[in-house]
């Protein structure tokens, strides 16, 4: 048995174990290394993944043509499949990390599930990588997801126009890639043209639908902290002195927050939101209460401005007067209604003798 045959037999025998290990290892690597969305290393790594995936698809399809002629599988073919799998795994795990950090899972879970499905499918459906339609669809999904947060970072803007620009750029780039691919493998591209165009346009329509129904997290914004406090004061250096009810870590994880207040006392919603350096935008604090029918009713909306660049997030707050006992929540949203974060809490009127904690943020 030749050396290549032994290697190929080993890979095929242990592939079911290699894929899960690769998934976990890659996810841990991305979570440790990709801390900020606006640094050169992060974007250089993701662009490298995109280039490796594109080059692997190109070379793999050339290899498939030659394999059909020689009726044999080369070491290059096996290596290219794993290179493509590795690069897509890195892209989708990074996208899942960044999108899950931005926005509320309760509001954007359909898009997160879509990325997670791609990430898991990348590891457990390796045979699909020999299909050109699957390759191009995966590349377009990764490219579109990347440009959605890359353009706001480099253009220092985030709005509908920037999102539409990312979609148009994705279509142009994937179209150019398929055009280049047709130079080398015209028959494969021609044979799969209908599937290629259908899958790309279908993914494009799906992501646009998720965006305009506010089911895509408001990346590159990320909520670092959100709390409701009984008193708040700002120091000259920009830090805040916050006083609120003491809660154990167990209560923080498993129970709704309880906020005690004196009659007619205002409450303060304080948040810290990360945004890339040089990006300035507006957010909204939406104060809501649950009525007798169980519906959430908006009591007030407060527009606030934030500026990017601070590692722990830009700090700002809103004040709510005329509070009354019951279940409340504070939604932190973009101007177009994308949910950045949410905190639900119960208001109880008291004499103010509770155990309070004071902290500086």
Image (cartoon, rainbow, N blue to C red):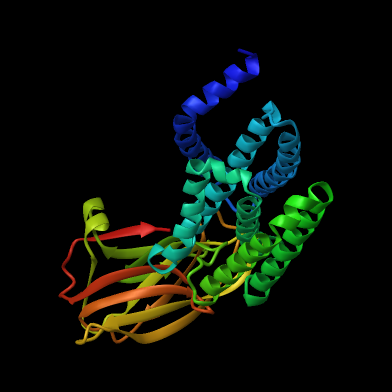
Which residue is at a point 51% across and 67% down the rendered structure image?
216
Left or right? Give the position of 226 relative to 73.
Answer: left
In the rendered image, is residue 229 in sight?
no
The residue lying furthest to the top in this view is 1
Residue 154: name its quadrant.
bottom right
Is residue 145 among what the camera can see? yes
What residue do we see at 69% from left, 31% from top? 71
Residue drawn at x 23%, y 84% is: 324
Q: Position of residue 92 (x, y in %)?
A: 55, 50
Which of the two residues, 350 or 128, is positioned nearer the viewer here?
128
Q: In the rendering, at what x and y percent does residue 348 appear?
A: 18, 75
Q: How many marks?
A: 0
| Foreground of the two, 321 or 347 | 347
Q: 83 above or below 226?
A: above
Left or right: residue 144 compared with residue 173: left
> Which residue is found at the position 42% from the left and 63% from the top?
109
- When the figure is inspected, residue 343 is found, relative to residue 91, above or below; the finding is below
Q: Which quadrant does the C terminus fall into? A: bottom left
Q: Position of residue 146 (x, y in %)?
A: 63, 57
Q: Quadrant of the N terminus?
A: top right
Percent position (x, y) of residue 291? Answer: 23, 86
């Amino acid at each position: 048995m030749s050396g290549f045959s032994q290697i190929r037999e080993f890979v095929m025998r242990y592939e079911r174990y290699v894929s899960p290990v690769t998934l976990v290892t890659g996810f841990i690597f991305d979570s440790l290394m990709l801390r900020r969305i606006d640094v050169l290393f992060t974007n250089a790594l993701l662009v490298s993944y995109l280039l490796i995936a594109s080059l692997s698809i190109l070379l793999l399809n050339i290899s498939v043509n030659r394999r059909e002629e020689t009726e044999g599988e080369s070491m290059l073919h096996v290596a290219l499949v794993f290179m493509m799998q590795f690069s897509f795994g890195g892209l989708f795990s990074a996208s899942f990390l960044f999108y899950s950090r931005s926005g509320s899972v309760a509001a954007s879970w359909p898009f997160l599930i879509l990325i997670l499905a791609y990430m898991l499918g990348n590891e457990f459906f390796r045979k699909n990588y020999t299909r050109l339609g699957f390759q191009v669809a995966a590349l377009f999904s990764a490219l579109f997801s990347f440009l959605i947060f890359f353009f706001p970072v480099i253009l220092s803007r985030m709005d509908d126009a920037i999102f539409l620009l990312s979609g148009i750029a994705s279509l142009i780039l994937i179209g150019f890639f398929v055009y280049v691919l047709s130079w080398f493998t015209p028959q494969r591209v021609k044979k799969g043209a209908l599937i290629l165009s259908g899958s790309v346009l279908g993914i494009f329509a799906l992501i646009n639908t998720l965006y305009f129904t506010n089911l895509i997290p408001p990346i590159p914004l990320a909520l670092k902290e959100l709390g409701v406090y009984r008193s708040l004061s700002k120091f000259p250096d920009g830090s805040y002195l916050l006083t609120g009810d003491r809660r154990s870590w167990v209560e923080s994880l498993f129970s709704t927050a309880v906020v005690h207040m004196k009659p007619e006392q205002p409450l303060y919603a304080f948040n810290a939101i990360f945004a890339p350096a040089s990006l300035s935008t507006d957010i909204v604090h939406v104060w809501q209460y649950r009525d007798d029918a169980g519906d959430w009713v908006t009591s007030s909306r407060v527009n606030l401005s934030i500026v990017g660049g601070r590692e722990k997030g830009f700090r700002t707050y809103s004040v709510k007067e005329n509070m009354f006992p019951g279940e409340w929540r504070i939604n932190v949203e973009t101007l177009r209604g994308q949910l950045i974060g949410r905190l639900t809490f119960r208001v109880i009127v008291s004499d103010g003798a509770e155990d309070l904690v004071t902290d500086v943020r």
